[in-house]
Image: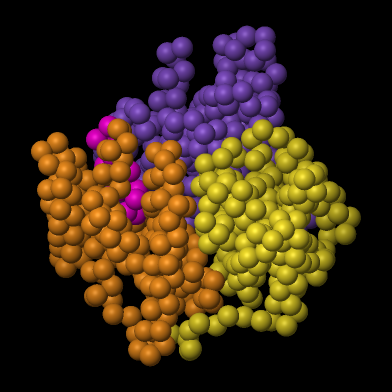
Chain colours: A yellow, B orange, C purple
Amino acid sequence: MNWIYFADLAGCAVFAIAGTLLAFRKQMDGFGVIVLASATAIGGGTTRDLILDVPVFWVADPTYFAVIAGSALGTIVWLRFKAYIPVNRLLFADALGIAFFTVLGAEKALSNGVHPIIAVILGTMTAVFGGMIRDVLARDVPMVLKSELYATTCIAGGVLFVLLYPLHPGIAMVSAMLATLGLRLGAIRYHWSLTVFKEPPGY
Amino acid sequence: MNWIYFADLAGCAVFAIAGTLLAFRKQMDGFGVIVLASATAIGGGTTRDLILDVPVFWVADPTYFAVIAGSALGTIVWLRFKAYIPVNRLLFADALGIAFFTVLGAEKALSNGVHPIIAVILGTMTAVFGGMIRDVLARDVPMVLKSELYATTCIAGGVLFVLLYPLHPGIAMVSAMLATLGLRLGAIRYHWSLTVFKEPPGY
Amino acid sequence: MNWIYFADLAGCAVFAIAGTLLAFRKQMDGFGVIVLASATAIGGGTTRDLILDVPVFWVADPTYFAVIAGSALGTIVWLRFKAYIPVNRLLFADALGIAFFTVLGAEKALSNGVHPIIAVILGTMTAVFGGMIRDVLARDVPMVLKSELYATTCIAGGVLFVLLYPLHPGIAMVSAMLATLGLRLGAIRYHWSLTVFKEPPGY
């Protein structure tokens, strides 16, 4: 299934752009850009592959790093000429990356024979770990811990995917990607959130 | 040996509660709770299993996540009604988790044929890495780097375990768990510490 | 090739000293020292071995921890008597560690049959990940994200190594180590940097 590979590369490109933009905001030099772009793009999938004990996806295929380097370079050129960050388009691209990575991660986990619940968890890890590592390195509050329904949408998309998977893998992937994307865009647009603590702690 | 499995689940429950309480203090939303609870509970064992190159313990058994989700939910309900953190009971529970995880980690390392010194190190990693990842994500100073004898007790418990192991595995586990628990509670009670630098650096 | 093993141990010793000095500056207690010294010394190689799916280098050989413990202890004794940090000698030692680890990491990757580009990336990870983990734990800005040509020298050294490797592995290792060392020392001495963003962001 060739389009899976392209969706994976597209997710890497989008996340590499997000990492480069954070490096720009934090005024880092050339290698800081590469580290943040790469950590965002491959951090999640690397963690997933290590835990599944399968070969790490980028070790046998330098294409991923070509895509990351190209995306980072393109972003740097853009910022030199424009010097502003198109926040809305960035949030949309990030939502697309999350939708791709959740479903691709869950699919890889399922086809390695793990329990559906574990597949949902590994899909979510694929989608959110890269950004989490990026935010830790750049000393930001991890977006995943603060933002509106950020990872909750991944869990919802992953659950939909493992439910539909027995019917038809391809339909399950496309539906779950669209559902994750829609939920995330809705959460951004309408500021949905999942508040669990009734009031701020009084100490 | 079924009680080992229950000790492992009990350790996860205790650490998931500790993670949830930190998420409460940091005013995080629903997924922040899940991330911090899970990172605390499974971070150490996951690192150990990756380094030993054995299957990661929770991948084949969704029970762990059921326990984590249950503990986090129970803690959230408790906080909604009580809205305070029982610090003393929490410290005791945390000490219990450390004692369990140190010994269970060292035992798993030994039964995979590593050198006793490495088994002590892996036992300590099992006990402290989860909390370390949690503190890094929540942007706290890692407790393990500051607190009274926090990990030193793990090393002591691990050493006792590998020394007694050749005599009788079961006795070694119980003695080392009790010793770790006792040392940690003593360190909390009497503020023991291990000062290595004579005076504060003057610059 | 015995000298490779000694270069590896020497790199660990140097990085363990760097970790201990950071623990001193942050006024940590005994275990904080051990954690920072170990993370710096073995963090990079552990990540490389996990990603290559080969046995983690220190699991079968307690010598590494003996070297780390000895280096940390020696540094503590030095600081008790002298109470100052010889910054210049430290930077030289760190540059030496980076040169060793880049080339040893790339060599291990190549001899496990990965693509030369991936070998350069894994060599760089071996050299910089330990310090990155140390800085994250100690809540410093990761040096790798800020410093003059820090990791860019690793990439240059790694590229030189994989280019010369087909001619003669031994000559490739020595040349690449010297080149990495020279570049890093030049970057420190003359404050070379790789600026990619034309001006500070205006928002």
Residue A6, position in %: x, y? 79, 47
Q: Is residue C37 above or below residue C14?
A: below
Instruction: Tell me: A18 left or right of B128.
Output: right
Give residue B183's quadrant in the image: bottom left
Q: Is residue C47 magenta?
A: no
Question: Which quadrant is home to the C terminus of chain C?
Answer: bottom right
Q: Which residues are magenta?
A: B115-128
Does any portion of residue B25 appear in the rendered image?
no
Instruction: Give residue C145's position: percent from left, percent from top.
Output: 61, 48
Q: Residue at the location (63% across, 65% down)?
A: A163
Question: Could you tell whether B53 is left or right of C202 in the image?
Answer: left
Q: Nearer the viewer, residue C143 or B144?
A: B144
Residue B91 visible in the current orientation: yes
Most extreme residue toward the front is A167
Residue B30 lies, in percent from the top left, at: 53, 76
Residue closer to the observer: A194 or C15: A194
**Which residue sits at x=23%, y=51%?**
B1
Q: Quadrant of residue B21?
A: bottom left
> Of helix, strand and loop, which mostly describes the magenta segment?
helix
Q: Residue at x 45, y 52 (%)?
A: B60
User: In screen coordinates, is A8 left or right of A163?
Assistant: right
Q: Position of residue B62 (x, y in %)?
A: 45, 60
Q: Report the label total.
A: 0
- Residue drawn where x is 80% and y is 48% of the image: A3
